[in-house]
Image (tube, rainbow, N blue to C red):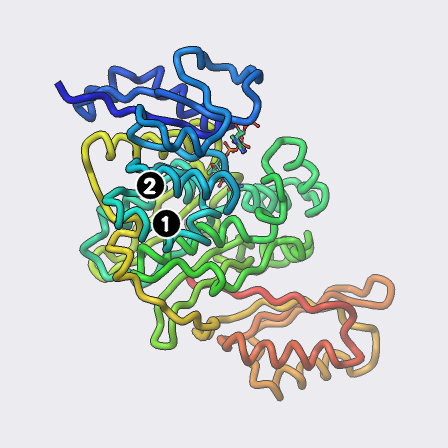
């Protein structure tokens, strides 16, 4: 009879406890599906006395996750602690060095150290699996590496941070401002320990770096992503975008161009009636375009105990079946170093500025845009409150570089108050 696959789990928080529950609840199902038993041998977390709501008495306890990773009685090290360095990195390296396969949900670790870890894994004849690291319960890594392996992928995009989508959709539906919703997310426990990872777009950019690598055969290049968070989005932007038939989403887009790899994670306007525009709450959506498949849309829960543990267990089952796929879908040594390209493809932009109540102010704004080569498609001025009036402009297609030039002009003029807001209108 085939031997059981023995797991060592480091991290017994939201995801780790979810994994323990599935292994216990579905022992027979897992065996039936993979042809071998899946068992937990040992676990690790910081606080051995904490009641985690699951029975851990059958498993050995290790205080040090590195010691857990090196144990002779585990086959797979499951890293569910988080963090791009520290114990997560040390224990994954130790696991690979001692001949274990690794399953992790840690996007930060892989976005920063993925290339080195993939090389280490392949040199040791081991694999790293990370389905849970991107878009929670959605099997997007599997889709890209396996189901879509016959495609030349042309674009990957999506909403990959549930917290930001929750805030943006509640701003729309509840008429609450960003600060109130940030507080609500804190109360609900939605925010990462460092909330800037969520609202600053960094967590979603980690995920985009991983998808880009698989899609385009490039080394994960987190530093090459243009990142902008949602902190500057106001209720006015939400309303005004809606008036024009758009929703604001923190959207990640990656595409390979002749100039290099374009990767951006930033708030964008998408049509209200598009699949992305209709995405509500903490749900994630990833859109993948390939030459043969055309377009597929994957939608589902991006976080939480059950969905994330579901993704971890998908990886565990593949290892139980003996499936060996290189970390980023092809040998690490063959991944290319793609130069990062600033977004070059022209798009329409939404601009919001506070116009001072001065004669000729609107004409000055129009002239600055015209002189920079930005053509106006639509423009709307709202009533003044005190000395400024919100002005909304939708441009015709322009490049980001041209728009930046115009924005410099708007900042320098004496008729615009505060920082202009500029959001790309994405064709989806
Ligand atoms: P969490 O609830 O904060 O749990 C972290 C666990 O790691 C805790 O059990 C903690 O121990 C343990 N830990 C931290 N430092 C440790 C150390 N030095 N030694 C041993 N154990 C240590 O985190 P989580 O939400 O489960 O997330 C885990 C990973 O999954 C992260 O990489 C995260 O980004 C990723 N992820 C999470 C979600 C989600 O919905 N939560 C979704 C996708 C991906 P104590 O419990 O004793 O403090
Ligand atoms: N903070 C992340 C989110 C958790 O809100 O999507 C899942 O990665």
Query: Which residue is the extreme one toward the left?
Result: 1
Q: Quadrant of the N terminus?
A: top left
Q: Note whether ligand 1 is within 8 Å of mark 2.
A: no
Which element type, helix, strand or loop, lies under badge 2?
Answer: helix
Vertical order, 211 against 81 (above or below): below
Q: Which residue is mark 2?
A: 96
Q: Which residue is mark 1?
A: 117
Could you say which quadrant of the image residue 339 lies in?
A: bottom left
Q: Is residue 12 visible?
A: no
Residue 407 in the image: x percent, y percent?
65, 76
Vertical order, 101 against 74 (above or below): below
The residue at 55%/69% (across/down) is 349
Q: Is residue 114 visible?
A: yes
Left or right relative to 31: residue 413: right
Residue 217 in the image: x percent, y percent?
29, 60
Sequence-earlier tag: 1 or 2: 2
Q: Are marks 1 and 2 in contact (CB under 8 Å)?
A: yes
Left or right relative to 377: residue 384: right
Give 344 or 270, whichever is nearer the viewer: 344
């Amino acid at each position: 009879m085939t031997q059981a696959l023995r797991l060592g789990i480091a991290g017994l928080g939201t995801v780790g406890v979810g994994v323990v529950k599935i292994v216990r609840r579905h022992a027979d199902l897992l065996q039936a599906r993979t042809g071998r038993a899946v068992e937990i041998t040992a676990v690790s977390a910081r606080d051995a006395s904490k009641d985690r709501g699951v029975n851990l008495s059958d498993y050995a306890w290790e205080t040090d996750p590195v010691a857990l990773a090196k144990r002779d009685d585990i086959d797979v090290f499951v890293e569910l602690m988080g963090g791009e360095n520290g114990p997560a990195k040390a224990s994954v390296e130790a696991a690979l060095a001692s001949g274990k396969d690794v399953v992790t949900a840690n996007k930060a670790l892989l976005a920063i150290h993925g290339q080195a870890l993939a090389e280490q894994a392949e040199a040791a004849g081991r694999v790293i699996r990370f389905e849970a690291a991107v878009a929670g319960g959605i099997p997007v890594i599997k889709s890209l590496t396996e189901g879509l392996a016959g495609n030349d992928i042309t674009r990957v995009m999506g909403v990959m941070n549930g917290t930001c989508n929750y805030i943006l959709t509640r701003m729309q539906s509840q008429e609450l401002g960003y600060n109130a919703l940030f507080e609500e997310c804190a109360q609900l426990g939605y925010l990462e320990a460092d909330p800037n990872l969520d609202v600053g777009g960094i967590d979603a950019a980690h995920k985009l770096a991983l998808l880009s690598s698989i899609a385009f055969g490039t080394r994960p290049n987190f530093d090459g992503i243009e990142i902008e968070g949602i902190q500057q989005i106001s209720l006015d932007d939400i309303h005004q975008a809606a008036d024009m038939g758009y929703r604001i989403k923190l959207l990640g887009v990656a595409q390979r161009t002749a100039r290099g790899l374009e990767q951006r994670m930033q708030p964008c306007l998408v049509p209200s009636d598009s699949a992305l525009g209709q995405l509500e709450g903490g749900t994630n959506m990833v859109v993948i375009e390939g030459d043969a498949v055309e377009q597929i849309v994957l939608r589902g829960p991006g976080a939480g105990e059950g969905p994330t543990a579901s993704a971890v267990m998908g990886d565990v089952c593949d290892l139980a079946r003996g499936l060996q796929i290189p970390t980023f879908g092809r040998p690490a040594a063959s991944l290319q170093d793609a130069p990062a390209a600033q977004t070059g493809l022209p798009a329409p932009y939404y601009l919001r500025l506070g116009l001072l109540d001065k004669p000729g102010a609107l004409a000055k704004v129009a002239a600055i845009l015209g002189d920079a080569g930005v053509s106006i498609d639509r423009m709307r001025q709202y009533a003044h409150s005190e000395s400024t009036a919100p002005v909304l402009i939708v441009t015709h297609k322009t490049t980001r570089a041209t728009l930046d030039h115009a924005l410099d002009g708007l900042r320098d003029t004496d008729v615009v108050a505060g920082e202009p807001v500029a959001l790309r209108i994405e064709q989806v």
